[in-house]
Image (spheres, helix red, strand yellow):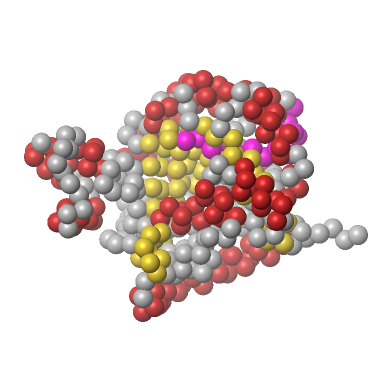
Amino acid sequence: MRNTISQYLGNMDKPVRAEFEQRLYQGQVDLQGVRRCDQIATTFPPRIITWSITSACNFKCRYCFAYYPPHGPAEELHACNRYNVNHIVKCFDHFVANGLLEITGGEPFLARQFIPLCQALTERYHISIRSNFSTDNLRAFADAVDPAYVKMIHASLHIEEREKIRNGMTRFIDNVNYFQDKGFRIRVEFLLHPTLFNRVGLDIEHLRGHGVKNIGLKVFRGYYQARAYPKSYSPQQKEYITHYGNNVDEVTILRGGTNFLGMRCLAGTRNFVMDAAGNITRCRTSEMLYGNLFQGTFRFDHYAKPCPYLNCTCPYQGLRGTFGEKVETSMLLNQFFVEIPSFIKSKMKTRKVIRYLRKRYAPTPG
């Protein structure tokens, strides 16, 4: 066992090994009874990269918060267009044993060589996928990828877009059932736009009546008729979400529990966000670049730093990554000054997006 642990520690990247040794020295890790090196990995939070593999999407949801610059997603520099599958997979090799790759978009199933990439990734890592579940290659994925290494598939249900497609709901339900039968953990997430409350109950009943097992509500974050959500949900709507709420994170976001200013966050140490080209930031709010994974320049912090932002645009990452009490003001100011260029860039981008969304969803005169 001693040789197994030594070999396992030797394969760790230096900051992770230093963290492990420090926790071992402080008595926070007990190796008594450990028989496999993968059990050691459970003493660490998983290293998670949320990879927006593409911004291309086949849906045009009227409430979509996605904002594309004038060049649009078509000219995006995709890693899948530049690198082969083996190179991409090899770049993740420094991850610890219990790491997770969360793949999102746009619509990830539109990415080039997506299925062979997921096949190769799941030979070494666990993945999760967020998709609108509408493409023609879904069943090919289900037949090719081992469900044991897919932690969760989040099938976002954009009901209005579905109804624009011939037999759209029937195809959606059939595909969800196909994945369920294959053994995949799949969750249908109904996005609760303010205009959909009059039908959400019947839609969920329809899904359940056709065999869909795991259904959840997803809080709308964005603008509608120049009003910000989820803050502008009515008391009755908030009560409905809370009563139905089978997702603690969604209820927390609904109640506005997403201010992490001054709290230590695993973003930058264990959690990261990556764009289609492999550029990495600590989170979606911060614009501070941590290098490029596919070019071998990726770095990460050696300890959890405090969140310097008043408004978190990545609440799911914040909810799973923040911990402890708020740090001293001096430490928070130090982190703020470090991120001033990122803060200014993020503010400018946020204001541009808000102006765009307010204009797009402004109430119609009369």
Q: Residue at x 41, y 42 (%)?
A: 101
At x 46% / y 68%, what residue is drawn? 261
What residue is at 27 percent from the left and 61 percent from the top? 302
Magenta residues (range)? 152-166
In this image, 323 relative to 172: left or right?
left
Q: Quadrant of residue 56?
A: top right
Q: Is residue 43 magenta?
A: no
Task: Give the residue drawn at x 24%, y 52%.
Answer: 16
Picture coordinates of residue 274, whole percent (x, y) = 44, 51
Using the rendered image of the protein, determine whether residue 63 is visible from the camera's viewpoint.
Answer: no
Q: Position of residue 270 (x, y in %)?
A: 35, 53
> Which residue is farthest left?
2
Image coordinates of residue 231 in percent, x first then y, are 65, 60
Taking the magenta stretch, the answer to whether it contains residue 164 is: yes
Which quadrant would the C terminus be assigned to in this image?
bottom right
Residue 157, visible in the rendered structure: yes
Q: Is residue 89 left or right of residue 102?
A: left
